[in-house]
Image (spheres, rainbow, N blue to C red):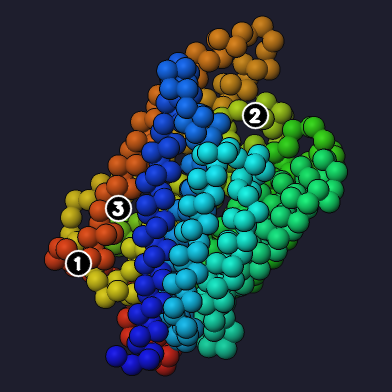
Amino acid sequence: MTSSSATHSKASSASLVLLGGSIIWSLLAGGLQIISTIKLLIPLLSRLLPISFFSYGRLVPASTFLLTYGWIGAGLLGVLLILAPRISGIPFRHGRFLIVGALLWHLAVLIGFTQILWQGSTGLLSLPYSRSVTAVFFVSFLILGIGISRGLGGTWKSGPLLPRLYLLGALLAFPLGLGTAETILRHSLAPGSVQIITQLVWHSFFNHLWLTPLALVLLFQLMPSLTGRAVSSLPLGLLAWIATFTLGGWLSNSLASDGPVPAWMQSAGVIATILFFVAVLGNGVLLRPLLEGKMDEIRRNVALRFLSVGAWAYVSAYAWLTFLSFPGVRQTTAFTMVSSATQTLLCFGFLGCVLTGSIYALLPASRNVGWPSHPALTWHFWCTTIGLAITASSYALAGIFQGLAWSDPGVPLSTISSYLRPFLCTAIVGQGLWLIGQIAFSALFFSTVLKLFPTTAPLAVFPISIVDHPDAVQEIYS
């Protein structure tokens, strides 16, 4: 085996470590989410099982942490480790360091998850773990980010521009936002009101300037490759990119209802959310022509099927955020279950479907394997989409009814609880369906990697030899 192929094998192993771990975290997070919803539906369980780490106040932040850092974060980094060298044509060097970085990321997730369950969350938005976990995340992201960004210039000039721009912004946003939040929030360098504002800004950085751009890298790179169509308007894409990274850090301010956040910041957050949604619509205009007239291909290609659902969920999630940002709606729905509906649309609908479609498309190119022709592919898609639709609509309706009831002082708390029960029951059904779909996907993933069954590979976006033959990059775009 040559040095180049050995390094490529180690880089591929690093991506498998990230992807395999992310699937395991998603199963654990889905189970914890169902348990937390059941405990909310049946409060008597807290008395029957008076275990501190089994309480609702610890299960919710633990499941959210696993979903964002463990499932989505690790998964997106894993698929980018497959994608980046196939765009640039430059193989990774020092593949062992990438494996170390992947293991460090999962170690940080494990430590943070354990701390949240046993000691409780820190109470900080998107920063529920200790300072030591932050340090491990930093070191891991430094290693993985250097590997992913290799060839970001140079030969990447021969490929699409928008994926490179979104990747560059995301790689800079995560360490900048996390470092600033860690410095201000942990060391008490600002008064309490400024710390709350810092939490909101960091929460926006994490969701809208890191995770969302990483998913857009995959949409703008894979959908043209799968459909054989190019993005129609680069100037519109550049305007949307500028708006995304200019306004993304302000979005969480629009959800702050009164309190210590100044009124002008709330207004700025509302304006930023509306303008951000305009940028989302711009990206939607670019993605829509890629899918027109492609229904037969969407039905046949499971990767394109998930990516198309992710693209629609992308627009829907930010349309929902824009609706919630309006003053009258914000004051009614503050501190209600609409936040769970937002998480479902953004995390499960947009980010999760894009991640899943990318794994379906890129894993054959990385490991020279295929996906088995098995009903589990259909089970995965329909359980995932139906489950997230039921969950999001249940939480949205529950939050709206909850907010309207709280606005009426004549409605007792017991009546509000009775309003929520039917929606919580349907939410559990939706979460259970999603978990069944994820179990089916995990069985497909690990059986495919281990080559346990005969497989038939779908369309591979990039041939496996492209890293060793950089000139082949031109052929993809010719």
Q: Nearer the viewer, mark 3 or mark 1?
A: 1
Q: Quadrant of residue 12?
A: bottom left
- Label disc, if present, on residue 283 of the rendered structure: none
**Mark 1 to mark 2 CA distance (whole Å):** 48 Å
* Horizontal side of residue 222 vs 115, given as left or right: left
Answer yes or no: is residue 232 visible: no
Mark 2 secondary-structure assignment: loop
**Mark 3 to mark 1 CA distance (whole Å):** 15 Å
Q: Earlier in the sequence, mark 3 or mark 1?
A: 3
Q: Earlier in the sequence, mark 2 or mark 3?
A: 2
Mark 1 secondary-structure assignment: loop
Q: Earlier in the sequence, mark 1 or mark 2?
A: 2
Which amino acid type is marked by label 2? Phe
Q: Which residue is at a point 84% across and 48% down the rendered structure image?
A: 190
Q: Which residue is at a point 56% across and 31% down the rendered structure image?
A: 57
Mark 3 crowd level (few <14, some 14–19, many ≥20, 10 Å Cα):
many
Which amino acid type is marked by label 1? Lys
Q: Please identify the quadrant where the C terminus is shown.
A: bottom left
Reading the image, the residue beneath label 2 is 335
- Label disc, if present, on residue 451 of the rendered structure: 1
Which amino acid type is marked by label 3? Phe
Residue 464 placement (x, y as % from top left): 32, 81
Above or below for 160 versus 241: below
Q: Nearer the viewer, mark 1 or mark 2?
A: 1
- Label disc, if present, on residue 441 of the rendered structure: 3
In-front residue for pair 376/318: 376
Asked if the residue under mark 3 is in contact with the one under mark 2, i.e. CB atoms within 8 Å, the reply is no
Above or below for 73 versus 122: below
